[in-house]
Image: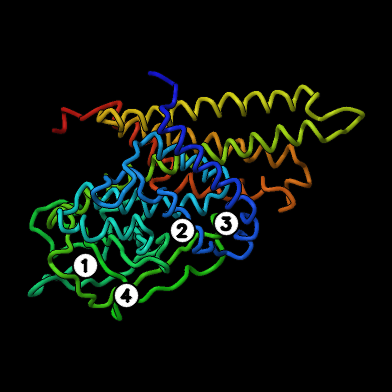
Amino acid sequence: MDFTFSPQQQQWQRIAREFAQTRVCPIAREMDESGKMPHSLVSEMATLGLLGATIGKAYGGSEMDHLSLALIYEELGRACSSVRGFMTVHSSLVMQCINYWGSEDQKKKLLPLLARGETIGCYALTEPEAGSDAAAIQTTAQKIEGGYLLNGEKIWITNGNIAGLAIVFAKLDPIKDAKPHNNITAFLVPLDQPDIDRRAMRGQELGHRASDHANITFKNCFVSEDMILDGEGMGFKVAMSALEHGRLGVAAGALGVHQACFDASVDYTRKRRQFGQRIGDFEMVQSTIAEMKASLDASRLLVYRAAWLKDQGQPSKLETSIAKYYATEAAAKAASEAVLLHGNRGYSNEYPVERYYRDIKGLQIYEGTSHIQQIVIAREVLGKDEAKS
């Protein structure tokens, strides 16, 4: 593998870094405290071409490769996980899903609006009784003349209150002797309808506080028959493919958090003096910094490998889960150590490491928890059990 970035990849990294450092970082603490992300940031990301991501130019996209997209998510994650989370849901879960599974009419109609930020997308899968077990969703779709009626509740839907379009997963009437996931269908649902109730999640989240998280309830919500992704009963396949796109975004975002923790720790241990010397001169502190750096480099290689495989058109499910699992776990440890190295300063919002510590917990959960990633990795490695086939 050639580790040299192409001119195009370097350009996207430079654009994302400049935006993250000059526009996002200065207001990251304010966004965290207010619980809001200014819509102006969305408009700026659209203008810069970031929202267009890997979508073809024929549909208003930027046609970048997946490694460039990973570099963007890394830079945004380094500055603010809430901003990175917004884009991953909008550009990877929603836009890439429509691009891969949508009809030509759906792509021409929806993707340009999403790329320009004129419509914001959300991904409505999680329910009160269906988290890791996506096949357990209880939202239903009743087939009627010309379309379907949706009924059910979705929770923890990122971008849910500000989105104009949702990919909603619902179950059709049960098919006899079918496995639960065979009844699931993916619907493209405009959210400006009276039969949809959207409310902010109750309570304050541990991290990602500037993200928009919603409860969405559908009460006989009509969806026309031309707004299905890839046909009836194909929703579970659509959902899992979208989550794989999202996992790369989460892994790259965790890499950015890890880099931010490392940078903050190095800077602080160089400047902070105790017992007549820099705390960075103490061997125990040096050991922590060394481990943080080694795991950072390992995470970066795993994330870039997963993105590179996607760009080569090769299967990358295993490598993406490995990257997501390792990068989030390594970043969580780095964030914990960063708070500890900062001492009482790390325990307050005087320094950003306490925000990194809170934010990284969400990345261990989103798009499949670390436990789920371990299951995916093990199953991919062990393969099918022929004795049960």
- For image coordinates 39% across by 35% down, the residue present is 374
In the image, what residue type sits under mark 2?
A: Val
Front-lying residue, 11 or 317: 11
Q: In which quarter of the image is residue 270?
A: top right
Q: Mark 2 to mark 4: distance in Å?
A: 20 Å
Q: Residue under circle 1?
A: 140
- For image coordinates 73% across by 34% down, the residue present is 267
As drawn, which residue projects farthest toward the top? 1
Q: Earlier in the sequence, mark 3 or mark 1?
A: 1
- For image coordinates 46% across by 58% down, the residue present is 42
Secondary structure category for the residue under label 4: loop
Secondary structure category for the residue under label 2: helix
Q: Which mark is residue 206?
A: 3
Secondary structure category for the residue under label 1: strand
In the image, what residue type sits under mark 4?
A: Asp
Q: Mark 1 to mark 4: distance in Å?
A: 20 Å
Q: Residue under circle 2?
A: 42
Front-lying residue, 314 or 320: 314
Q: Mark 3 to mark 4: distance in Å?
A: 29 Å
In the image, what residue type sits under mark 3?
A: Leu
